[in-house]
Amino acid sequence: MFEFLLAAAGYVHPSRWESYGIALVEALALGVPALVSAAIQMAPSLAAGDAALMADPEPAALADGLERLMDSPAGLGARARSFVSTELSWDLILPRYLDKLGRLTNRA
């Protein structure tokens, strides 16, 4: 699968409701330029990091996004890879996760 993604011109994640797609994160981690639905939970973070192109999950907006993806800005793939290594690292995520688990267990 990695060979397929690495050979791809881009990755498109047009979902309306999916929050953190594993396939999306794998593509970003490999530095594949991505077009992402502005409706997913991770969209604001990706936009803030300039790590992916955004489009509304509507046919016309996605078509425009595909054209932008084919002419993706220089460094988009590198920013995607950097986003995953910094914003989605275990060092950052695990303490947050454990804190939330602790809060849940203290409620019981």
Image: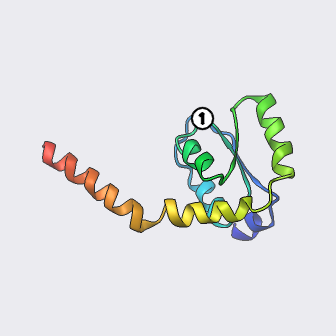
Query: Residue 87: image x %, image y %?
Result: 50, 59
| Residue for point 74% across, 57% down | 33
| Residue for point 77% across, 32% down | 61
Relative to 90, is 108 above or below? above
Tell me which colouring the rendered structure shows: rainbow
| Residue for point 66% across, 61% down | 79
Q: Quadrant of the N terminus?
A: bottom right
Q: Quadrant of the C terminus?
A: top left
Give the tally of numbered discs. Answer: 1
Closer-to-camera residue (42/14)? 42
| Residue for point 47% across, 65% down | 89
The answer to whether residue 34 is seen in the rendering is yes
Q: Which residue is mark 1?
A: 39
Residue kind at label 1, given as amino acid type:
Ala
Relative to 51, is 57 above or below? above
* Neighbour tally class for label 1: few under 14, some 14-19, many 20 plus, Cα within 10 Å: some
Q: Quadrant of residue 107?
A: top left
Closer-to-camera residue (8/66)? 66
Query: Residue 15: image x %, image y %?
Result: 63, 38
Query: Residue 103: image x %, image y %?
Result: 21, 48
From the viewer's perspective, tell me whether residue 30 is left or right of residue 88. right
Q: Quadrant of residue 18?
A: top right
From the viewer's perspective, tell me whether residue 7 is left or right of residue 38. right
From the viewer's perspective, tell me whether residue 45 is left or right of residue 65. left
Which element is circle 1 on? loop
Query: Residue 4: image x %, image y %?
Result: 76, 65
Relative to 66, is 2 above or below? below
The answer to whether residue 32 is seen in the rendering is no
